[in-house]
Image (tube, helix red, strand yellow):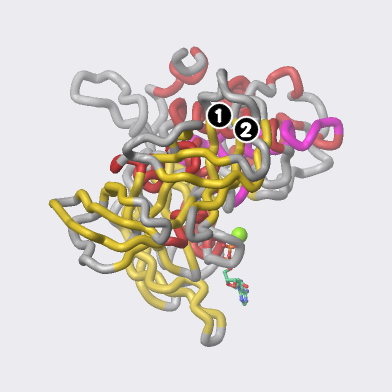
Amino acid sequence: MGEPAALRATRSSDVNVRTSPTGRLRERDAIGSSIAVRDAVKRYGSFHAVDRISIDIEPGEFITLLGPSGSGKTTLLNLVAGFQSLDSGEILVDGKPVHNVPTHKRGFGMVFQSYALFPNMTVSQNVAFPLRMAGVDRATAERRVAETLEIMRLTEHAAKSPSQMSGGQQQRVAIARAIVRRPRVVLMDEPLSALDRRLRESIQIEIRDLHQTIGSTILFVTHDQGEALTMSDRIAVLNAGKIVQIGRPLDIYRHPTDRFVASFVGESNLIEAEILQKRGSTLTMKNRAGYVFSAESRDTIDVGRATVLVRPERIAVSNEPNANSTPVSVTSAIFLGEILRIEAQMEGGEPLLIRCTDMADRPLPAVGDRLHVSWGAADCWVLA
Ligand code: ADP
Ligand code: MG
């Protein structure tokens, strides 16, 4: 699936478009800006809402700020948008400092949790609004609105008023309004939080596709780890005003730097264990139950005690012991359709959560049943 024909046809006349040496439009990084945040600080009194954050965002990248409520996501987004000013540090867009550029001159598209549509305007009037403000001529504006409604699959709703639309549709109108000028940067602050789960998941995919189509740099804020994993090229995990880890979704999920990231992103078992031996990045470890297993780590881990992360879906379960396994006792088992969710206790008392997908020949375990679990080095990550 390519982009809609209407958009393809008009792109060559768009001032924002850069073409590759062959003259062909590059798909992804065609119009997005780079954003560099350097040592950004924002204080409220003595409280550091943003505490020396630095981040380099590539042109056309989809980057997500992920963190719990109060971690500073909105403050950072507002600094980039120009709604708030830095106490120190700087923000560069395409290499140029923006601290003297007011919000409306930054030309960014913005989407918030509340749709903030104009209730007395139709859908197409709402989407046309930024073009009117920019003094775009009528014919161009009409064409742009039509294209944008098509991209967001809103064409049939053009003449409706916002009150005649569902929450999901209204948010798609707000997104259409944010992208109608083909901004180099789109900022989104928890745009899907007010929607129910199924709607949220379908709009997540729409926003991803939209990003492929328009090529803008997207800075997206969420507290929902699943959403961040689904949508992003890279995720910056925030805690207490700092970025604690930045990386691709798979890296963040598999190789979190610390307990905070490990427990915030995905479900996790954090197991205390002693490092018996270290060979390169592979460690031999023993936990309280006396279970000896291998684990992967960064090279910098010292011998001693450590916390290891084992994801619940990476644990192999068997009814019989084998050379690599350790026994556990079931404390709860729930059938969830595609998986079986088992809570168990290891010898020594540590709890273990297991998400078991290969359950075709397995009856639902009962509380008190004994099972035998194991995991491989690749499924076991030592935290810093
Ligand atoms: P998030 O978007 O991650 O939930 P925010 O960026 O909104 O977090 O807020 C970060 C911290 O800064 C919070 O502790 C919040 O209470 C505080 N904060 C935000 N805005 C203000 C303000 N205008 N005055 C005082 N404290 C604020
Ligand atoms: Mg917020």
Q: Left or right: 219 with respect to 290? A: right
- Residue type for callout 2: Glu
Q: Furthest residue to the left?
A: 280
Question: Can you tell me which quadrant of the image ligand 2 is in?
Answer: bottom right
Residue 139 in sight:
no
Callout 1–callout 2 Cβ contact below 8 Å:
yes
* Element class at badge 1: helix
Q: Furthest residue to the bottom?
A: 46
- Residue type for callout 1: Ile
Neighbour tally class for label 2: few under 14, some 14-19, many 20 plus, Cα within 10 Å:
some
Q: Nearer the viewer, residue 33 or 240?
A: 240
Residue 185, position in %: x, y? 45, 45
* Element class at badge 2: helix
Q: Quadrant of residue 143?
A: top right
Q: Which residue is mark 1?
A: 205
Q: Which residue is mark 2?
A: 201
Q: How many marks?
A: 2
**Residue occupying the point 71% across, 45% down:** 115
Residue 61, position in %: x, y? 38, 41
Vertical placement of residue 45 versus 255, above or below:
below
Residue 109, position in %: x, y? 54, 45
Residue 342 in sight:
yes
The C terminus - image quarter? bottom left
Vertical placement of residue 87 versus 291, above or below:
below
**Residue occupying the point 51% across, 58% down:** 350
Q: Nearer the viewer, residue 226 or 291?
A: 291
Q: Is residue 82 highlighted in magenta?
A: no
First to last magenta residue range: 164-191
**Residue occupying the point 83% across, 41% down:** 120
Distance of label 1 from label 2 (alpha carbons): 7 Å
Q: Left or right: 237 with respect to 47? A: left
